[in-house]
Image (spheres, rainbow, N blue to C red):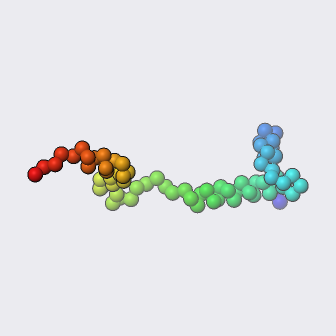
Amino acid sequence: MRTFRVSDQTYEQLKGLIVDPFDDTPEIVIGRLIEIVNKAKARWAPFEAPAATQETEPAAKPRRKEQEVHEEEESPVVL
């Protein structure tokens, strides 16, 4: 087992993350934080668009029904 030192401020923050004061030790809290970080990393994706989509124009935004009805009413009729 390794031992490490933390500042008083960090230790107070660590104590603030204790859920169950009877069972939670600093090691359990740190382990829980590591699990949270690992889950968050699994959801992160690099911000790089695929090459195919960079060369094409961006897709049009989907229109709301109110916009479609409003545009139809104002469009001139050509015969």
Does residue 37 appear in this view?
A: yes
Left or right of 55, for residue 12 = right
Q: What residue lies at 34% left-to-right and 47% top-to-bottom?
A: 67
**Displayed quadrant of residue 11:** top right
Q: Nearer the viewer, residue 38 or 19?
A: 19
Q: Nearer the viewer, residue 59 or 49?
A: 59
Q: Quadrant of the N terminus?
A: bottom right
Q: What residue lies at 76% left-to-right and 54% top-to-bottom?
A: 30
Left or right of 13, for residue 64 = left
Does residue 5 appear in this view?
A: no
**Displayed quadrant of residue 20:** bottom right
**Displayed quadrant of residue 25:** bottom right
What percent of the width, then of the height, locates residue 22? 89, 55
What percent of the width, then of the height, locates residue 56? 29, 56
Which residue is most to the top?
9
Q: What residue lies at 36% left-to-right and 48% top-to-bottom?
A: 66
What percent of the width, then of the height, locates residue 71? 28, 47
Which residue is most to the right?
22
Say above or below: 23 vs 71.
below
What percent of the width, then of the height, locates residue 73? 26, 46
Left or right of 4, for residue 73 = left
